[in-house]
Amino acid sequence: MPDQELPPYRRIADDLRAAITRGKLAPGEKLKSENELKDHYGTTRVTVRKALSLLKADGLLISEQGRGVFVRQQPRVRLQTTGANFRERRSTGVSNFTAEAAAQGLRAEQRILSVERLSASAEIAERLGLADGTSVIVRRRAFFVDGEPMQLSDGYYPETLFSGTPVEAHGRITGGVSALIEDPAGPVGQRIVRFVEDLEIRMPTPSEVAALLIPPGVPLARVLRSAQVKDGRVVEVLDSRVPCDRHLFQYVIDVP
């Protein structure tokens, strides 16, 4: 549809979107008032309000009670998946997410929400090679970048392997669980040789919206990652949920 055939609110929304994309309106910058925008575009406040609502639904703008409408801050983390990248990050002695964020000049924080035992669902049991209902240890964590919630991640571990280990404690593990898995004196003592990731894009649940502060209209990526060790066992399944407006996934696949 040619621009002149677009409804006025769409033309205003497209103009503001372009200004945000090109950096003319910077993250955190306050927009003009509805009255000022009305006069600028030669239209009505109702039309301006519809345009702003559209951009809020796209996750580009955010309203602050009593202060106005602002360009939404959108710190992004590039999550790069390669074997060499994993090894490089592991050598830093910090978790992969934290190392990835630090490499991009961002300040990452990890919070452990809970550690518990429960019966594995059919989905998790299948990936771990366990019978349905087998007891597993679950570590639920939230990740933040520059103070903004970026990811929820639940790690599932066979109880028979990890009972009595740091995985079961409500505390940080130096180098992450991967370091414990590969520690020759640890419960597994084998090198991780393969990751399998299943990626699902869907709309977030109300609890995910609340925990991750996801604006209306922004989808969520769910990544189920299984870690396989040398003898073929899957010893960890990570169920991560990330807002699609804050992450860039990069998969590098070496083809022999």
Image (cartoon, helix red, strand yellow):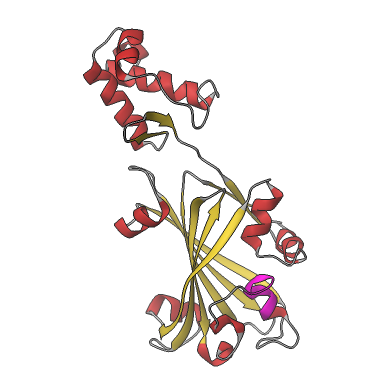
> Residue at 26% of width from left, 10% of height from top?
43
Q: Position of residue 148 (x, y in %)?
A: 50, 49
Q: Is residue 52 left or right of residue 164?
A: left
Front residue of 227/173: it is 173
Determine if the magenta segment contains residue 177. Answer: yes
Most prominent secondary structure in the magenta stretch? helix
Q: Residue at x 38, y 87 (%)?
A: 133
> Camera-side residue: 1 or 187?
187
Residue 86 pos. (x, y %): 70, 63
Check the image and report above or below for 56 versus 147: above
> Looking at the rendering, which quadrant does residue 181 occupy?
bottom right
Residue 50 on the magenta segment: no
* Residue 252 showing in the rendered view: no
Q: Residue at x 39, y 19 (%)?
A: 32
Q: Quadrant of the N terminus?
A: top left
Residue 210 at x, y = what percent? 35, 54
Question: Where does the C terminus fall, quadrant-wise?
Answer: bottom right
Name the residue rendered at 42%, 34% in the picture. 60
The answer to whether residue 35 is above or below residue 98 is: above
Provide the residue span drawn in magenta.
173-180
